[in-house]
Image (cartoon, rainbow, N blue to C red):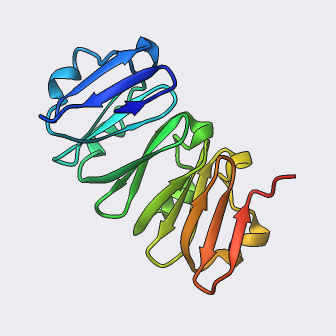
Amino acid sequence: MFFTPTSVAALLNDGSVLAWGNQNNGGKIPDDIQPRLRNVKMIFSTDFAFAALLNDGSVLAWGITIPDTIQPRLRNVKMIFSTRFAFAALLNDGSVLAWGSENSGGQIPGPIKKQLENVKIIFSTDEAFAALLDDGNVAAWGNLDYGGTIPDNISFQLQPAKTIIPSKRQFTAVCRNGGMVTWPYLQ
């Protein structure tokens, strides 16, 4: 089972999905989506929505609408990640698509979008995403106070990173040289 704070989605053995709870937070699957929720591989959630990754690599979401500009490109999805208010999809080609609240990572700024090639994995805090690229570079977007921007004074220290450890409000990169770098700095 998968949860928002007020709704539940259950992935059944036959690959179909049931949902219940607050209708505004994913507790009701819209009539146009329900019949297409077949062969579901995994379900992901934000605080108010669910996204289903189907076995064919496509994605369906309810509780939050996937923009028309993104929905047709949600093919060959490898994995979905979430903040409290946004989703990010990692595609098999290493690119990334996001939707949801802009301030929580639901829109990828142009300069960051250009960096998001050959993404290995994505990590999230409550309101930001950080992508680890195959070459060890790191790109972040979302709420500045939750790690959505890597400060210039530490960005050079991140390369190359081996992994990223997220918390509710911060990211810590474990670098290949054994060092660790955390952002944002919380007082």
Q: Indicate whether 61 appears above or below 106.
A: above
Q: How many marks?
A: 0
Quarter of the figure with residue 72: top left
Residue 41 percent location from the top left of the image: 22, 44
Quarter of the figure with residue 50: top left
Q: Is residue 117 visible?
A: no
Q: Is residue 64 left or right of residue 141?
A: left
Q: Indicate whether 171 appears above or below 34.
A: below
Q: Indicate whether 6 appears above or below 139.
A: above
Residue at point 65%, 46% (across, down): 168
Is the N terminus in the top left, top right, bottom left or bottom right quadrant?
top left
Q: Is residue 134 left or right of residue 84?
A: left
Residue at point 79%, 70% (across, down): 153
Residue 187 percent location from the top left of the image: 87, 52
Quarter of the figure with residue 16: top left
Residue at point 50%, 67% (across, down): 132
State the residue in front, 183 or 150: 183
Instruction: Identify the residue at the far right of this view.
Output: 187
Q: Is residue 63 left or right of residue 10?
A: right
Q: Indicate whether 19 appears above or below 107.
A: above
Residue 69 percent location from the top left of the image: 36, 37
Instruction: Identify the residue at the far left of this view.
Output: 14
